[in-house]
Image (cartoon, rainbow, N blue to C red):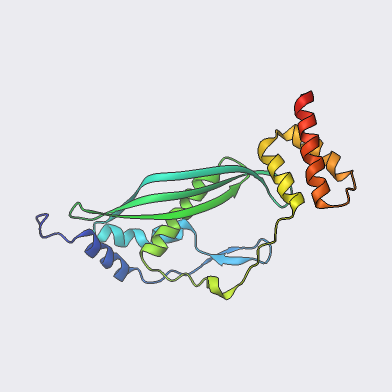
Amino acid sequence: MSAETLPTVQQAWAAVMADVRALGKDQRNNSGGGFNFRGVDDVMNAVGPAMRTHGVFVVPTAVDLRTRDAQTTTGKAAHETMVVVSYAIHGPAGDMMPGAAAGESLDSGDKATPKAMSVAYRTFLLQALCLPTHDTDPDAQTYERVQETPRDTALRGIANAADASTLDQIVKWADGQGLASDADLVRAVVAKREALAVTA
């Protein structure tokens, strides 16, 4: 079969979509209230055979990676990774269709980035193949962001600019002051930070 008679990547991807129409949540996470989920292997096991049948493959082409130190609810040190991964879907005729998806993970070892990449790939396949997720619709819940107080603003600014030991000193000192208002705290914390910088 010549390249001219092979299906385009869009046609081949549509054929994969026709073969894979649904995927249940057969795994269970029992932490907290617990929930059912489908893992990346579940998605690949369901989608992979159809992709191979129709001559389609997906490769990552770029990763926007962001990491930060974090803590678990038990106080254990952890690493948080957020990625936006760009993908290329290649068809049997050699043409390509781009896509992208985001992923996020938290891990106390060295697996935060691989986990985030797996989440992004699973999300990409679910969305690109229009597979129903049976998740709660985002519009079904309403959240209100807590307004940041001047105290929060001051301490966040210090956290962004001070090293950990200096931040510890300032926070301990500020918590023991019993200042009358947040405005007083902001002024006092700024003064204390400047004094620490001078004596450092």
Q: Nearer the viewer, residue 93 or 153?
A: 153
> Is 164 located above or below residue 54 in the figure?
above
| Residue 130 position in % (x across, y down) | 38, 68
| Residue 149 position in % (x across, y down) | 74, 55
Q: Residue at x 40, y 64 (%)?
A: 127
Q: Nearer the viewer, residue 23 or 93?
A: 93
**Can residue 173 be spotted in the picture?**
yes
**Can residue 136 be spotted in the picture?**
no
Q: Nearer the viewer, residue 24 or 13?
A: 13
Q: Nearer the viewer, residue 83 or 35?
A: 83
Residue 3 falls in image quadrant: bottom left
Q: Residue at x 10, y 60 (%)?
A: 5
| Residue 90 position in % (x across, y down) | 26, 53
| Residue 181 position in % (x across, y down) | 84, 52
Residue at far bottom of view: 140
**Residue 167 relative to residue 98: left or right:** right
**Residue 12 relative to residue 140: left or right:** left
> Is 136 located above or below residue 152 in the figure?
below
